[in-house]
Image (cartoon, rainbow, N blue to C red):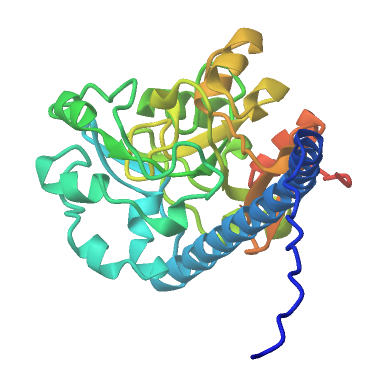
Amino acid sequence: MLPSLPFRKRRQRSAFTLIELLVVIAIIAILIGLLLPAVQKVREAAARMSCENNLKQIGLALHNYHDANGTFPSGHKVLGGRYYANWAIQILPYIEQGNLYQQYNVNLPNVDPANLAVRQTFVKVYTCPSDVNANQIIKPESNSGEPGSGAAQSAGYATGSYRAMSGVSCTGFDQWAGFPSEVAVLMGKCPGNRGLMHGDGDGGLRPERMGSITDGTSNTIVVGERVTRTHRTRTTMWANSFNLYSCSGAFPQSAALLPDYDACSHVASDIAQCKYGWGSFHSGGIILFVWGDGHVQGVQSSINMQVFVALATIANGEVIPDF
């Protein structure tokens, strides 16, 4: 017989006590709390970099458009009271969207049903990842009043995040991206206040050339961010040619740089500052712009507004201080 082995009693492992479990949970919660801000910062940095790249492509496209056509595109064109293609539509072939451009009939008004598919197409280059309204089809709050504009408004437009700088009003009400009658008033009162891309056609203006930028290309804002967390019906819609949905202006009031339409409306001296404003959701209050020479640079929402106004014009002769 084999000798019997002494029996060893297996020692049972005690389970976690409630206190130990709570400590572990607390440690995990603390780690998550520490990691989340870091993750958010990485995401914001990536979104801002993507946004900067979009604006660089837009700036390059505008220069290539100028090389091919001898002028920059119109902010939007109005002929016989009908709105046609805006700047963002005109440069589609220069941002590798030639096929989409071929679907748009530039000989028909923007609101024509034939152009519906393009008006509702999302374009990545025109969308900042930080935009809370990105990749949505939204019905704009207003329309041009021309035939077919009501149906186009009801159908909705694809959102975007960038608008062209149309210039600085010297009356407060009239806008360089407004109705042709407004453009005509401003051209008579303060022609040097115009931006690079404005309403052309019936108002008497034509597209600008590089030589028009006598204030210096590196000192002139061309395209920048316009997003809003409220009143989505006033957000940017890249293929909407009517006045305020693809162009903005500059104002001496800081309300125009708020990324919140409703908040702007509560403090603005004129609602035009909110309709034709700017704004982004980047940390630090930075709003990104592409400038006349093609470089991309952020502007603080706390900028001296007199300086911002000077940066918006192409031929007003201002001396720009550091900002």
Q: Residue at x 22, y 21 (%)?
A: 145
Direction front: furthest residue = 1
**In the displayed structure, does residue 110 sit left or right of residue 54?**
left
Q: Position of residue 59 (x, y in %)?
A: 55, 62
Above or below residue 102? Residue 201 is above
Direction left: furthest residue = 114
**In the displayed structure, does residue 193 sit left or right of residue 131?**
right
Name the image quarter holding the N terminus: bottom right
Is residue 317 at all visible to an observer of this figure? no
Above or below residue 33? Residue 55 is below
Above or below residue 50? Residue 195 is above
Name the image quarter holding the C terminus: top right
**In the displayed structure, does residue 70 sit left or right of residue 92?**
right
Q: Position of residue 186 (x, y in %)?
A: 52, 27
Of 131 and 95, nearer the camera is: 131
Is residue 123 at all visible to an observer of this figure? yes
Q: Based on the displayed image, in which of its 4 quarters is residue 55 positioned?
A: bottom right
Q: Position of residue 17 (x, y in %)?
A: 77, 39
Q: Residue at x 74, y 37 (%)?
A: 285
